Image (cartoon, rainbow, N blue to C red):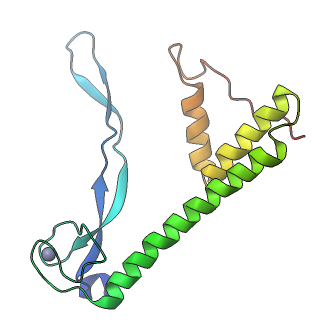
């Protein structure tokens, strides 16, 4: 969405926190230190009353009653549909990988399948994949407690 469209629109996107704070506590003073930022998502808000839009299929804001433009609602619905369809596509690609290669003997091949499924589910995003591997290796003995095995292609 363009900047211009955001100003004119009665529907705007805002960042919304989803929780996910993680803390460690200092053993001396018991003060909690934030180690992970909360997860955020973009949600539609009414530009008139500033409250979250609960149902984009409704013509009016359920809080203040302002009427949303039909094309704005359709644009938002399409944005969500595109994200939904894209997620479904990733799931099917992961299933396809398991179906095609999951039965091949050898744990190194099965590890390869799991690694490939993770990559597909993370939309082949290198940064997300690195985060995932980092989390998988992290444990009670520090960041290299476990190994992540990328496996061997069959
Ligand atoms: Zn409103």
Is residue 146 shown to the viewer in this render?
A: yes
Residue at image coords 82%, 26%: 107
Residue at image coords 79%, 33%: 110
**Residue 66 in the image: above or below residue 103:** below
Is residue 151 shown to the viewer in this render?
A: no
Residue 138 in the image, given as x and y percentages of width and height: 54, 24
Task: Report the front residue among 101 and 30.
Answer: 101
Residue 46 in the image, given as x and y percentages of width and height: 20, 74
Residue 50 located left or right of residue 151: left
Count how many numbered circles sit on residues in the image.
0
Q: Outermost residue toward the top?
A: 28
Task: Report the front residue among 113 and 137.
Answer: 113
Task: Report the front residue among 106 and 135.
Answer: 106
Q: Quadrant of the C terminus?
A: top right
**Residue 48 in the image: above or below residue 94:** below
Residue 3 in the image, given as x and y percentages of width and height: 34, 82
Residue at image coords 83%, 29%: 108
Residue at image coords 19%, 13%: 29
Residue 83 located left or right of residue 75: right
Quadrant location, ligand no. 1: bottom left
Residue 91 in the image, given as x and y percentages of width and height: 62, 54
Which of the 4 image quarters holds residue 43?
bottom left
Q: Quadrant of the N terminus?
A: bottom left
């Amino acid at each position: 969405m363009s900047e211009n469209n955001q100003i004119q629109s009665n529907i705007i996107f805002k960042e919304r926190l989803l929780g996910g704070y993680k803390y460690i506590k200092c053993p001396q003073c018991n003060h909690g230190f934030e180690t992970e930022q909360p997860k955020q998502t973009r949600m539609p808000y009414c530009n008139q009353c500033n409250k979250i839009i609960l149902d984009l299929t409704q013509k009016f804001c359920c809080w203040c009653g302002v009427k949303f433009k039909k094309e704005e609602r359709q644009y938002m619905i399409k944005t969500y549909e595109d994200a939904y369809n894209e997620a479904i596509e990733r799931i099917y690609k992961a299933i396809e990988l398991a179906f095609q290669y999951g039965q091949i003997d050898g744990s190194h091949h099965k590890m390869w399948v799991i690694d490939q499924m993770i990559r597909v589910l993370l939309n082949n995003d290198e940064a997300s994949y690195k985060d995932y591997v980092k989390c998988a290796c992290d444990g009670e003995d520090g960041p290299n407690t476990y190994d992540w095995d990328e496996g061997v292609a069959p």
